[in-house]
Image: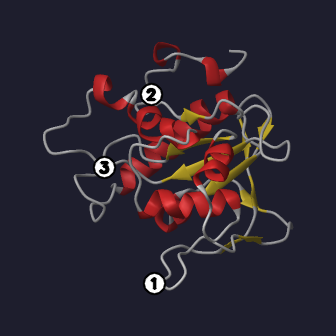
Amino acid sequence: MDDPAELNMEAWPAEVAFVPYVGRGYWKGVEGRRVLLLGESHYREAGWTDDPVVTRPFTRETFGDMQTCNRKGGGKFFDELDRLLTDQSSPNVVDAAHAWQHVAFCNLSQRFAGTRAGHRPSGTDFSQGGKWLVEVILPLLRPEVILVLGRTAWRMFDHGKRSDQPTFHARHANSEGRRRRYLEERHVWSLDYGNGGRG
């Protein structure tokens, strides 16, 4: 597969329930490095199932308009990601859209967690998702940097080893004046994955 960003849904292996969002400039990267944002899980509307007809396009449909200036939705999580990607405390939509064009996004869990943010994936969902991430998704996307967004995903992801690189610091990961929701510093880990890649 030459350019997974161009793959249609059917080209992704069946193990990938939620086909990753891949920005149109992903292969050019952020300052020349391919960046994957790794979240924890998606949430469903009441009545939705884990049928591939629902799940396979879900991530791309949810995040696809982030790379445009005509966004349909949003929320705190998306605002925080805009701040992280632009390194601005109040990014404008043009800067944020440009940043989203150069990253990919997927979640560690390959199952819906529930119908609201308080619902959490099971440990099995995380460990199985980690297996598919390392064996299937990473070899296709070949990221050079993976930003793990959730505390639970960070604790549950048991691949790689801590490197001697400086601590990563996201100055604007949290909203000003609000309760601190996200960790702003992370140690950098090294991760080998299929096809000889390193993340």
User: Which is more foreground, mark 1 or mark 3?
Assistant: 1
- Helix, strand or loop at label 1? It is loop
**Residue type, numbered disc 2:** Glu
Q: Nearer the viewer, mark 2 or mark 3?
A: 3
Residue 43 circle label: 3
State the residue position of label 2. Answer: 15
Residue drawn 75% across the image and 64% down it: 188
Q: Is residue 86 above or below residue 28?
A: below
Looking at the picture, how far across and down is residue 54, in whole percent? Answer: 29, 29
Precedes in sequence: disc 1 or disc 3 = 3
Asked if residue 149 can be seen in this view, the reply is no
Mark 2 → mark 1, Cα distance in angstroms: 37 Å
Residue 46 occupies which quadrant of the picture? Answer: top left
SS for callout 3: loop
Q: Which mark is residue 179?
A: 1
User: Looking at the picture, how far across and down is residue 153, in whole percent?
Assistant: 50, 59
**Which residue is nearer to you in this view: 144 or 179?**
179
Q: Is residue 198 in view from this perspective? A: yes
Task: Indicate which disc, 2 or 3, sits on the residue closer to the N terminus.
Answer: 2
